[in-house]
Image (tube, rainbow, N blue to C red):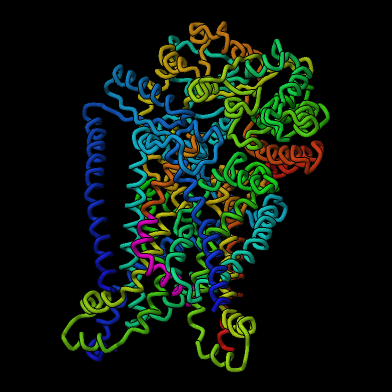
Amino acid sequence: MTKNSQSNTFLYGLLILYSGVTVIPFLWALSASFKPLAEIASGSIHFIPQQFTFANYQYIFTQEPLFMRWFFNSAVVAIGVTLFNLLFNSMAGYALARIRFPGNQFWFFLIVAVLVVPGQITLLPKFLILKSLGWLNSYAGLIVPSLVNATFIFMMRQFFINFPKELEEAAALDGLSRLETFFKIVLPLAKPALAAQTIFIFMGSWNEFLMPLVVMSDPEMFTLPLGLNAFKGQYISYWNYIMAASMIFTLPALAIYAFFNRYFIQGIAFSGGK
Amino acid sequence: MHRSFLQKLSHFGMAFLLLLSISGCHFGADNEYRDRTHLSQNSAITTITLSGWQSNPNESKILAAALDRFEQKYPEIRVKYEVINSQYMDVIKTRLIGEVAPDVFYLDALEAPLLMKYRVLEPLDAYITPDFNLADFNSALLQAFQYHNQLYGLPKDFSTLALFYNKKAFATAGIEPPPQTWQALQTVSQKLTRDRNQDGKIDQYGLGFAPELARQTFMIRAFGGQLINTQGCAAFANPAGLKGLQAVVDQYRRDRTAAQASDVGATWGSEMLGQEKAAMVIEGPWSIPYLKETFPEIEFATAEVPTIGEKKGTMAYTVAYVMNRQCQHKAAAWKLIAYLTGTDGMKAIATQGLTLPARKSVLAELGYENHPIYAAFVKGAHYATIWQAGEYLPTISAHFNNQFLSALFGEQSLETAMKKAQETANQEIYLSN
Amino acid sequence: MPRIWQRQRSQEALSGYFFMLPALFILSVFLVLPILSALILAFCKVQLLGEVRYQFTGIKNLLRMIADERVWIALKNTAEYVAIVVPIQTILALGLALILNTNIRGKKGFRIIFFMPTVTSSAVLTLIFMWIYNSDGLLNHILSFFNLPTYNWLGDPAIALKGIMLMNIWSTAPFFMVIYLAALQEIPASLYEAAQIDGANRWEQFFYITLPSLSPVTFFVIVMGIIGTFQLFDQSYIFSGGSGGPNNSTLTLVLLIYNYAFSNLDMGYALALTLMLAVVIMTVTLLQRTFFREEQVH
């Protein structure tokens, strides 16, 4: 008993230590975002700001008029990409799993094959294709190429293959078409898989840096990670502003994480176990 | 449990719709904007996009004011100003490739040769009228934007480097006047390098410096070295070219009286000076407003860069307005360039004191030649090395910076490092052709 | 397959393609077409600025790669990175998962906290760490408080990559921790019960049951770690302002590709490098798949 509680104390010690390691960088950034520049420049290491101020946040919103625009761009792209992915990946996954059509096997093979190809290889040709479409510097240039995701088509196929057939049989007897069955019966029951997708695709898109860097060159079209990087370029030694901007950027992702965190863990376990 | 997820998802969908409706307003605004340009075809209002970078928020305020005056003078032209603050040239090149480049943009002399060679810029000679008075420009600056006898850019301003020093630190160490020669600079650096609280860590270095080719080219030339040969390839790795650089390395490694910004937790030279982590730095006029605003309690003064090898030397940087060859409204774009580089436009922007005006008449009018702080920069213009050296300079500079740093950190001798920098740079130049 | 639907074969084919249409369209334009054009353009010299010109140059780009010192530096950095980051993050992930798999109270809360770095953007994390790594910053203050040596984390070429490594271990270990956690929960309790009856102590249980059961997952985690390392870009780009400096110490392959493509405008050579990267990653992935399958058979 005592041995057990001793080892428990030890484990708690480890967990708390690692929690500290995890949280301190965030807290330090948060604290810097409430400090005036003078306090930061003085090199003091107080976690609680000596002269607490909201001025940094205020400054960002008033002096960096594009900040809201970047936020908006990120939201449009991330939400748009997520919603379309949920729909299109599920549709394709369902077709591959359940519908017998000529070429079914071939397309499935092709999707598995492209899964092996790393994304970087497509970056530069994608840039050239978007250029010829005239889509550089537009939402379409960021959203359309990511409307579907081969990994999640694959995942959805695996999910639908194990899906009970009886429901579809019943729907067919009720006279529902494929389309109706899919939207009314199948999709509502695919929630866990959709949840996992939502989180991964949203987070991936929200945090993406390389693709927007290549596609968006007009500051008005930047997404937040690019804006943040540009902001850093301009306010190179103004760590108070940089940290405040970072905090604003991090909040939505953390909120979604808090919101969906259970599905998040499931989703990862799912992706790891496949 | 599952229902709650769907609910969450539908909340999400709602939020997205809400966002789209807001974006509707945005697009509405865009449409309005387009209407305006559309209208422009009828009532001849054209929109010109102008891209540049800004080194502080004040700078764009002053430019915006100048653009307002421009729009008042030419009501048929609207200017859309975009600030690009990260990897400016990568962005501009990408936009030129993507054919979404701005009509008028800033171009650093460093990158001018490449863009002039690829014919993506509009030659400006045909637009220049006698009353624009091209002869008023500093001719060395104009030369930086000439290629095959055509002029592709009009310098908006220039900057040289001078020695900034902390007056209080000089007084404490009993130094007067500021060092005139590089030997003197090294001697006073020793006096100025101090461990104030005796913790074994130096709090104030004598000199703060930037180990970059952009800042050190004049050191290569000080003893007769050359940065590039006639083919535009790197040619600095010889005893003459290295002698000046060796002085920098020695002061850093042997004397330990100089520091780079990252050694002391700063991001650039003037921040070191402001935080009293360096008593002297070699920086440009852009530091003057910065120091006054960010570190008002620091009393600083400037002097010419100390002579090295009995020669005066410093760097000069210049940026021009250039016109995109694919610009749809070239006449209007020229009006904008002519206004901003004209006497009035240039004066309005030069008064903020970040840089020096490229027109001799404006420079004289603002009285910088006799200004206690700015005079050193104006004098420097007579003997400065302009930061430009053919189309391969960005490549040479990247290799130099890498190897010079490794010499500073003692990973290899300066000679080995510079030989390697020269070889690898030239190899890359050769292979890319 | 419901019989009613099966009877209408053409209808089925039609709805099949209807369901597949968006995916097929997007994948062919933005995945298959780019892959094919990359395969071709990697053997060309491509000029994009001004006049667009393509010129077939054969294997010149491949030869250039071998002679390009920066390619080798990027590969060396990656190798160093793999050698240090992958083992540490794997062990850390396993350790945390083992602790959280015990009947300890409040583990859910810990799990949520541990996971925060994984959901935060790499752009933000990089900025936060640059701020902490500042010579006068938090990390050096903590180190000097414990009388440990301090470093110029951002400026010293010998240290800069270590800084990025530290940050990446910190931010990716929790991700792998969750994968381990899921795998741990799938180990049948009966195995442990049987071992206990046989008189095995905790260590023996760990070495003879837990670790062997986890080996496919460990393999997965290691391979994912290696692939992630090859794809490193954001951190190096922001850390070094795009240059891969100081002294190429934070240069990665993807950053090098980006620089050749968008600073040097050498698209053909950049694509050749991309091809090389793709071959490396695909080899690692295929190795993982073959091994993974074999493991599952046993």
Residue range corresponding to the magenta coloring:
A253-274
| Residue at the image position 21 percent from the left and 88 percent from the top | A170
Compared to C13, does B71 lie above or below? above
Compared to B75, does A45 lie above or below? below
Name the image quarter holding the N terminus of chain C.
bottom left
Name the image quarter holding the C terminus of chain C.
bottom right
Between A221 and C199, the one lying in front of the other is C199
Q: Is residue C51 visible?
A: no
Q: Position of residue B123 (x, y in %)?
A: 48, 26
Is residue A219 located in the magenta-colored stretch of the structure? no
Instruction: Determine the image quadrant of residue B280.
Output: top right
Instruction: Determine the image quadrant of residue A183.
Output: bottom left
Between B8 and A147, the one lying in front of the other is B8
Q: Position of residue C249 (x, y in %)?
A: 67, 48
Compared to C33, does B209 lie above or below? above
Taking C253 as reference, is A181 left or right?
Answer: left
Taking B240 as reference, is A86 left or right?
Answer: left
Instruction: Determine the image quadrant of residue C264.
Output: top right
Q: Is residue B393 visible?
A: yes
Q: Position of residue C167 (x, y in %)?
A: 57, 54
Q: Main secondary structure of the magenta part?
A: helix
Is residue A268 located in the magenta-colored stretch of the structure? yes
Q: Position of residue C63 (x, y in %)?
A: 70, 56
